[in-house]
Amino acid sequence: MLLKQLQIKDFRNLNKTQLTPINGVNLIVGDNASGKTSILEAIYYLSHIRSFRSQYVTDLISRQSSYLQLVASIETRDNSTIPIGIRRARNKSEIRVDKKPVRRVSDIAALFPVLAIHPDSYKLITGSPSQRRQFIDWGVFHVEHGFFQAWQRFKKALSQRNAALKSKQKNDVCQLWNNEICTASNHIDQLRSQYFDNLSPYLNDLIQQFFPDDNISIEYKRGWPREVELSELLDRNLQKERLKGYTYYGPHRADISLKVNNQSAQTCISRGQQKTLVALMRLAQAMHFSQIKNKSCVLLYDDLAAELDAAHKSMILSVLSSMDIQLFLTTIEEDQISLSDWSDSRLFHVEHGDITCKT
């Protein structure tokens, strides 16, 4: 799915403007605080119904307005066009796809897959396990059939079991949901493991290019020990979990272990190296998605020139130019990014929240 047009109203400092990108690379140039990152954020919001910069909708709505509005045209693989409209107030949201109301974020996420690389992306390594679960679940959701349904079943069962644990219900009441939890958990783990195994060759190839002198291992941890059945752990730890009020083991505790030369990537490499490694993880996801689904996704790369040294910038641009994606890049100066490897490019300039197409 590709973005053909986007109209933006009262999203951060973008009061009323529009963008008509191409299918190749779209370079957005502008000074700091001009609104270029807000454009990427608006595109991301179309897919995720949340920002990659803030968890508060009040940060996204322009100060002089009571709501933000995004209206987009998405081109499908068969070249048909689907309109998407989002109107978000502080306490109310309205989402429409093809003029029909949408209730679930998963519906719009499946229609318009978007990945983002930005200055805070390093937190995928340094942040909480939930961020690394989001990384893997984006890919599983988009390429592995049945994941969303299994995750919904698991969340419902987990919520019921945790409520029983928290209220100190009898053992048999707490265990009522064990079978459903185990069935859904094993399915989720199977899908996550399958996705991670299929993603690894793409990621390993990139790592060898960018970290030739380092031994980097990235391992999926399912949320309970491999040598023990989840059902056994739920039974064995019931009394401890009744005291704590929550279920300790399961796919909600999954994580990804990243090590460089047998040491944690959280502490043994520099911030710049962390940003490069996270960028490679996102690029691998985009490559794998395009190969498996036989269609493009959208990749947003904010301030690429500032995030990488000259050598790695050139290498990343070379990789990006070979990918089957619709790409949006931002930079302060046009000459910071070379688009010579692309046959199809478009330049936009942003000033005081207004977008002008230069090519």
Image (cartoon, rainbow, N blue to C red):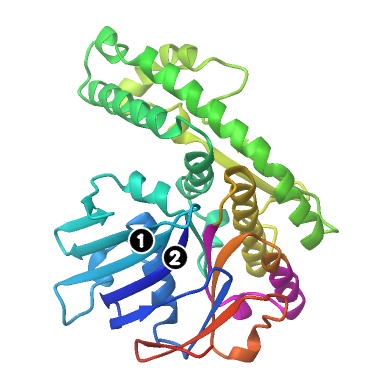
* Of the pair 217 and 143, the residue shown nearer to us: 143
| Marks 1,2: beta carbons within 8 A | yes
The magenta segment is 297-318
**Percent coordinates x, y for residue 303 in the rendering:** 55, 77
**Percent coordinates x, y for residue 63 in the rendering:** 19, 80
Mark 2, secondary structure of its residue = strand
Which residue occupies 67% across, 80% down? 339
Q: Earlier in the sequence, mark 1 or mark 2?
A: 2
Residue under numbered circle 2: 3
Which residue occupies 36% across, 23% down? 241
| Quarter where residue 226 is shown | top right
Residue under numbered circle 1: 46
Res 245 seen here: no
Q: Is residue 170 left or right of residue 218?
A: left
* Of the pair 65 and 132, the residue shown nearer to us: 65
Q: Amino acid at mark 1?
A: Leu
**Percent coordinates x, y for residue 357 in the rendering:** 46, 87
For residue 309, above or below residue 112: below
**Percent coordinates x, y for residue 179 in the rendering:** 38, 12
Q: Is residue 353 left or right of residue 119?
A: left
For residue 149, above or below residue 304: above
Q: Amino acid at mark 2?
A: Leu
Which residue occupies 43% across, 68% down? 4
Q: Is residue 223 left or right of residue 57?
A: right
Separation of residues labelled 1 and 2 (CA atoms): 10 Å
Mark 1, secondary structure of its residue = helix
For residue 278, above or below residue 221: below
The numbered dot on residue 31 is none
